Amino acid sequence: MLSAFGNALRTPDLRKKILFTLMILAIFRAGSVIPTPNVNMVNVNACRVEAAAGDAVGLYSMINLFSGGALLQLAIFALGIMPYITASIILQLLTVVIPRLEALKKEGASGTAKITQYTRYLTLMLAVLNSTAFVTLAVNKQLFQGCNRDLVYDASLFPIIVMILTMTAGTGVIMWLGELITDRGVGNGMSVMIFTQIAAQFPASLWGIKESRSSEAEGWIMFIIVLLIGLGVMAGVIFMEQAQRRVPVQYAKRMVGRKLVGGTTTYIPMKVNQAGVIPVIFASSILYLPMLYAQFQPLDADGNPNPIAAWISANLASGEGWVYSVVFALLIIGFAYFYVSITFNSDEVADNMKKYGGFIPGTRAGGPTSRYLKYVLNRLTFPGSLYLAFISLIPNLAFILFNTQSKFVFGGTSILIIVGVGLDTVKQIQSQLQQRNYEGFLR
């Protein structure tokens, strides 16, 4: 990987792309620490310290993770990339349900551009809703649990509207910056920006593990142990992300005009983790719903403590314990099967193979091929979903073993995204290097 980056920096065209990407990421990080107007940063920082000490930010951990900590600073890029991710997932699911979107997807570049336009509109709508919710929580002193300080200077209507519009505009700027990276930089813009926000929290989280120990020697020992465990987890994640089942496919020879084509042998690569990180995001989003209910309905109609809200707060809102772990793992496994089933259309793959004279050795074309692909996919999804559930629960296991609470960074969604985006970016750099440094058999 280091040699690939070294060769890329020596190539003028790629060097310009890498430097352009770094410039955009610097602007992105700057916007993640600049507060929105009307925010009392003194009280916000005090509440953040209290929340970090008591681990009271579990409800917004996923959004705060994707925003690089900007959410709990009420920065102009507070929402981060989360509205765009949510909009993309919604459009991807609606493509299976709505025939018009499915037809657009099959139209090629023009249809994809139209779906991208819909995604942008939906992103801005979600940004308005999310910013309104978080600004309301900040005004009502509910953004940080147990902190009663005033987070805004003025709670009147106009300053609140300005805060909402600023955060929404920040989301629009983030979309534009991501598309600039995709068009003129290196890698997928949105993925690289998520990678940057998550990686920005690694140094502080690792140092927090060291500082959480009572003695200096114990802190350094725990720091080294966590670092070694993290490297092992990262190696395992890389192995699983690269693992795939290659289903062999043969193409029969056929006449096209006056030419005899076909007769080649290839394969269908089916990854063990076919769903990526999407099931983890789905499961986290579903678990937010009862947590929000518990936060906004702590009392019943008679003014007494709501028993359902109390149970949710005790077992789910903390993000710890065996109840939360079991529910989270089952949701991840279920969503993994669901997402794979709607993204990999075995019937369509089988029809395309049959159309071009392809077949799997030992399996008839058409329906038997589709059933065989479904069988293989289900067998692969089971270990893939267990792997996702295990990686996502590593922070909980770290809390039990090392008492690191939410500061353990080598686990969960963060490590999956960092490894996945890193591998994809390196592959893109290597492919561009091969295009520029291809050597034939004559030197």
Image (spheres, rainbow, N blue to C red):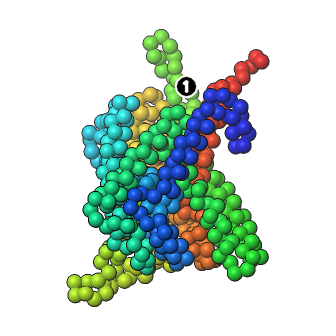
Name the residue rendered at 34%, 33% in the picture: 111
Image quarter of the C terminus: top right
Q: How many marks?
A: 1
Residue toward you, 133 or 402: 133
Task: Name the one closer to the observer, 234 or 34.
Answer: 34
Residue 442 position within the rendered picture, expressed as x and y whole percent measured from the top left: 76, 16
Reply above or below: 226 against 256: below
The residue that label 1 is drawn on is 263
Q: Is residue 316 above or below residue 334?
A: below
**How far across and down, in percent of the image, does residue 300 sit?**
26, 83
Task: Looking at this view, name the residue that lies furthest to the front.
Answer: 153
Tell me what residue is drawn at x 47 percent, y 63 percent: 73
**Side of 186 where 225 appears, left or right:** right
Which amino acid type is shown beneath numbered disc 1?
A: Gly
Residue in the image at 61% along x and 46% along y: 423
Q: Is residue 38 above or below residue 298?
A: above
Q: Position of residue 380 (x, y in %)?
A: 52, 54
Label 1 sits on a secondary structure element that is: loop
Residue 116 seen in the current view:
yes
Decide: few, some or many residues near mark 1? Use Cα within 10 Å; few <14, some 14-19, many ≥20.
Answer: few
Observer-nearest residue: 391 or 217?
217
Give the residue drawn at x 69%, y 35%: 9
Residue 431 in view of the camera: no
Residue 406, position in %: x, y? Answer: 56, 70
**Residue that protrudes farthest toward the left in the picture:** 301
- Picture quarter with the N terminus: top right
